[in-house]
Structures are given as structure tokens and as C-alpha cells.
Amino acid sequence: MEAKSKKEFKKICEYAVHYEFCYCYLCGLPILDGQKWNLDHVKPASKGGKTTPENLRPVHYNCNQAKADLSLTQFRAIQELKERHK
């Protein structure tokens, strides 16, 4: 399925979450039916990223809040450091 808008892309993701497995782009764990989730910009909007299906990925709500406007590389580096210092 190809989405032409953010709304259409979100509908596709909702279908995937409800009927199949949809994985969080940030942590890699499945987003389960009933879990709170968002669409996140791969390239943050605050850094010029567009709100297009190509730049949006499904993510857990909490992962999205933790990432804020960091790049994926920055976010994963911080998560790795947190894991090391547990």
C-alpha cells in the first residue's frame, strides 16, 4: 500500500498495528494493538524534515517523547549509553 498523505499513512499504520505487527522505528519492539503510538519524523521537522509518508515512521509514544528532536543516530547513542550505565 502506498500512502499519499500523513492521514492515509496513519490509517495504513493503524491497520498494521491492529491486524499484523508494526514495529517501533526507534526501539524495534512491536507496537501492539491498544498501545499509544505516534508517527515520528525520520528527519526532525525542527531540522527541515517534511511531513510526508517517506519521512514518517510508527513509534511508541514514550520512545517518541524520549527522542524529542534528536536524530535517530543521536537517540540510539543515548539509549546505548543509558543501557551501559544501568
Image (cartoon, rainbow, N blue to C red):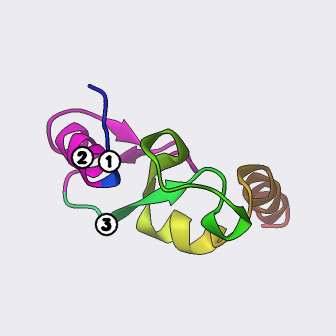
Say which label, 3 or 1, has the lower sequence index. Answer: 1
Q: Which mark is residue 8?
A: 2
**Residue that carries the numbered disc 1 in the rendered image:** 5
Q: Earlier in the sequence, mark 3 or mark 2?
A: 2
Magenta residue check for 85: no
Residue at 71 percent across and 51 percent down: it is 72
- Amino acid under label 1? Ser
> Mark 3 sits on what residue?
36
Does 72 sit left or right of 60 as displayed? right
State which quadrant residue 68 falls in. bottom right
Secondary structure under tag 3 reads loop
Question: Residue at horizontal 55%, vertical 74%?
Answer: 65
Callout 1 crowding tier (Cα within 10 Å): few <14, some 14–19, many ≥20: few
**Picture quarter containing residue 82?**
bottom right
Q: Nearer the viewer, residue 52 or 40?
A: 52
Q: Specify the amino acid type for callout 3.
A: Lys
- Which quarter of the picture shows residue 30? top left
Please provide percent x and percent y for residue 32.
Answer: 27, 50
Q: Nearer the viewer, residue 69 or 54?
A: 54
Q: Residues within 10 Å of mark 2 (few under 14, many from 20)?
A: some
What is the distance, in whole Å, between disc 1 and disc 2 at their CAs? 5 Å
